[in-house]
Amino acid sequence: MRTLVVVPTHDEAANIGDLLDGLDQHVPDVDVLVIDDASVDDTRAIVRARSSFGTRLRLIERGEKRGLGDAYVHAFGVALADGYDAVVQIDADLSHDPTVLPTMLDLARRGIDVVIGSRYIPGGSVVGWPRRRTWLSRWGNRYAAIALGLAINDATAGYRVYRAATLRRMDLDAIRAEGYGFQIEMTYRAVAAGCSIVEVPIAFRDRVAGDSKMSGNIVREAFLLVTWWAISDAVTLRRRRRAYHDHD
């Protein structure tokens, strides 16, 4: 199964080298695409210096910050055009442990459409987050699950494997969310497309070095989009029921 690991970066010089070393150690057969948005530190130089990867490591350099969602959609397009069988999402800040990736890839190899590294199922955990941020994350997941009817415990998780065939079934050009809400939107679209989804427990660790990209605007975007999708679904369902009764 040809696999492309996608790593979005912005000023991740303190972490990207260790992440690449971890991927090289635990999943040596995968290819890696780092898609960097306007880093002003040594992120790009560190990626270029990882000669041990050879042609398995690519770097896309973008001149401005376009958001997490835009970076992943761009990378998905590259993966599909290049004929990969699976695409991995992983954060550059060492929050996601590469040792779990072989298990996740094995599930994708067996035919699971979307494999999610989950913090909120038995065996999963969050290490190093303040109580307020953990509460916000759990509340956001609960709200998304209830509003959108998602039987997923960690719809905001950023550690995932998508089968290429799954991405082709989704309308990637219609993706609207840029930040925190991107993961929810991808989950929502995967469920709507009838995809099989399995959650794998992970220990999520807060970044030790570098600055978090989370902001109040990102959280607000996610909340507003989830609310909009829920209202749109309710309106669509009401119209279908009305049309059914009128026809009957």
Image (spheres, helix red, strand yellow):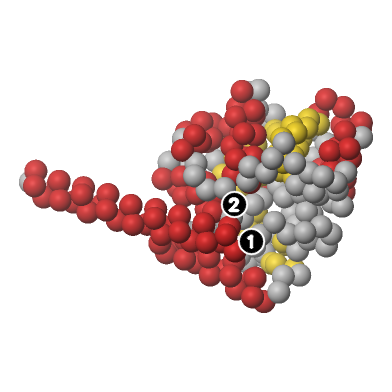
Q: Residues within 10 Å of mark 2 (few under 14, many from 20)?
A: many
Question: What residue appears at the point 69 percent right and 56 percent down from the top-left corner?
Answer: 213
Can residue 25 be seen at all in this image of the molecule?
no
Which of the 4 quarters of the picture holds residue 54?
Answer: top right
Residue lying furthest bottom in this view?
A: 131
Which residue is labeled 2 in the image? 179
Judge left or right: residue 238 versus residue 232. Answer: left
Callout 2: SS: loop
Q: Quadrant of residue 192?
A: top left
The residue depicted at 63 percent of the width and 42 percent of the height is 66
Q: Label 1: how many residues lie within 10 Å, few (<14), some (14-19) or many (20+)?
A: few
Callout 1 amino acid: Ser
Q: Which label's residue is closer to the chain start, 2 or 1?
A: 2
Nearer the camera: disc 2 or disc 1 = 1
Question: Left or right of 152: which side holds 12?
Answer: right
- Who is closer to the viewer here, 129 or 216? 216
Tag 1's secondary structure?
loop
How many numbered dots are placed on residues in this image?
A: 2
Identity of the residue drawn at 87% across and 33% down? 48
Image coordinates of residue 62 in percent, x first then y, are 71, 35
Amino acid type, mark 2: Gly
Whole-percent x, y for residue 89 in the image: 67, 44
Residue 172 visible (yes or no) = yes
Question: Quadrant of the image for the N terminus?
Answer: top right
Residue 229 is tagged as none
x, y percentage for residue 155? 54, 56
Q: Residue at x 39, y 53 (%)?
A: 229
Q: Which residue is mark 1?
A: 215
As measured in the structure, the alpha-carbon distance from the residue carrying label 2 to the one carrying label 1 is: 9 Å
Is 133 positioned to the left or the right of 60 in the image?
A: left
Q: Position of residue 215 (x, y in %)?
A: 63, 61
Check if mark 2's residue and mark 1's residue have beta carbons within 8 Å. yes
